[in-house]
Amino acid sequence: MTKTDLLTAGLLAASYLLGGIPAGYIIGRIKGIDIRKFGSGNPGTANVYRTLGKWPGVLTFTTDFLKGFAPAYLAIKFFYLGAGHWWIPVAAGGLAIAGHIWTPFLGFKGGKGVATAAGVFMALLPLPTAGAFVVFGLAVALTHHISVGSMSASVALPILCSVLNTRPGQKPFTIMAFVVCAVIFYTHIANIRRILRGRELSYEHKEADASGDGTK
């Protein structure tokens, strides 16, 4: 095994472990609670925001975003040497997202992957990702549901990638965007069910206690 192979393996392992750091859970513990026992029980931005407030929510999002951005950026900067090396940033970004959703630090039960995926694609394809952020903001403003914004952005991203990402060497990143969109919808199945029943709470809702009733 060459030095490059070892560095690549190290990057991929670090991508998964970095993605697996449960920022929302850690912030909750610092605040004296187990975020998994509040609201939806999800250690992601939305549940932290509703339970602990604006700034813990912002910190959770920022940390989760950077967990995806850092490994994808390093892969692009130092390992993406040409079209034949596309799999390295794809694998690094994918493993960071997988680590967030299936974190080894919480029994492989983590967040929904949105913020980490946003970080990954901001490193890989910044222009389409910026457009997806706009779609997210508009959807949340219209519906008051972060979950709707997340799913809307996940649909917009591969479409924007298809339109704006015309460089042949980056086409695998567009394919990855379609796969991640499907994963985001998978992690939001419970939200979709609550939306259909009219029980999805808005981002303005604040959790008052640790009832753990599964409502988000």
Image (cartoon, rainbow, N blue to C red):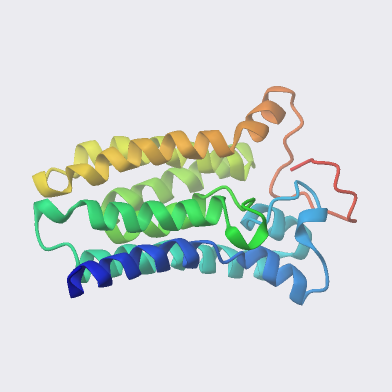
Please provide percent x and percent y for residue 98: 48, 51
Q: Let me know if residue 60 appears in the view.
A: yes
Give the x, y percent position of residue 139: 52, 39
Quadrant showing the C terminus: top right
Whether residue 145 is situated above or below residue 36 in the rendered picture: above
Left or right of 5: which side holds 58? Answer: right
Q: Is residue 26 above or below residue 181?
A: below
Residue at the image point whose x is 23% and y is 51% from the top: 87
Q: Quadrant of residue 31?
A: bottom right
| Front-lying residue, 52 or 35 | 35
Residue 49 screen position, x and y as percent: 69, 59
Q: Residue furthest top?
A: 196
Is residue 130 left or right of 214 when viewed as pictured? left
- Residue placed at 57% from the left, 39% from the top? 187
Q: Residue furthest front?
A: 1
Name the foreground residue: 216 vs 103.
103
Which quadrant holds the N terminus? bottom left
* Position above or below: 108 against 188: below
Give the residue at x 61% y 67%.
23
Residue 127: % across, % down: 27, 53
User: Is residue 65 in sight in this rendering?
Assistant: no
Figure label count = 0
Image check: 141 left or right of 155?
A: right
For image coordinates 64% across by 42% down, the residue present is 144
